Image (spheres, rainbow, N blue to C red):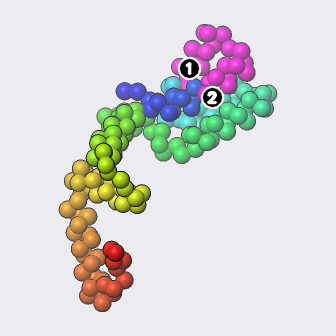
Amino acid sequence: MQIAETSKQNINIVKKIIIETLNLSKKEQCKLSVQVKELLWSGSINGISALVQEKLVGYKEALVIAMKKMNGYFGDQAKFQYKAFRDNGLPTGSGTVESAIRRIINLRIKGTGIFWKRENAENVIFLRSLVLTGKIRNACRKALKIGRTMFDQDSICDLPMAV
């Protein structure tokens, strides 16, 4: 398993700030990389932030830049539960999503002579995802229930009509 490419890119920017600010030797760079990787795999974004603050104490400008990058990308820590993902056999890289985009969007929605309005394309993508995940039947049942309720309440005229 691998850590998502964008996580690597962003954490490498933070590491580069530390390395250049402190002028770390190759051995120290390797040690820093191991520390950061272990913290990232355990999902400890706060641990990485603490390490950055510890390393850059006394280097205010570099600390501000590094923490801005940390908070900007790693702010929503729920996305970085790599340990839980790995423990449950879930993918941590972006390959699955990129493959899905290629298959669902590029091969099914785009094509020679096919043109979409944005909102229509989004609706088709949503419907396709319901079909591929096996949730279309449940979605149709819910839609029919809403329609029946509106009809029974004589509010069916509130539905938008296609022109």
- Disc 1 to disc 2, how far (Cα)? 11 Å
Q: Residue at x 40, y 32 (%)?
A: 93
Give the amino acid at mark 2. Val
Tell which tag, 1 or 2, sits nearer the viewer: 2
Q: Closer to the camera, 68 or 129?
A: 129
Residue 60 found in image quarter: top right
Q: Closer to the camera, 41 or 63?
A: 63
Q: Is residue 115 above or below residue 59?
A: below
Q: Residue at x 30, y 45 (%)?
A: 112
Residue 74 found in image quarter: top right
Give the amino acid at mark 1. Ser
Reply yes or no: does residue 30 show up in magenta. yes
Left or right relative to 21: residue 39 = left
| Secondary structure of the residue carrying numbered label 1 | helix
Q: Position of residue 46 (x, y in %)?
A: 59, 37
User: Which quarter shows the N terminus?
Assistant: top left
Q: Earlier in the sequence, mark 1 or mark 2?
A: 2
Can you identify the residue that label 2 sits on?
14
- Residue 46, visible in the rendered structure: yes
Q: Residue at x 44, y 29 (%)?
A: 3
**Contact between labelled residues 2 and 1, with CB atoms less than 8 Å apart:** no
Q: Which mark, by number, is residue 33? A: 1
Q: Which residues are magenta?
A: 13-36
Q: Position of residue 97 (x, y in %)?
A: 37, 40
Residue 155 found in image quarter: bottom left
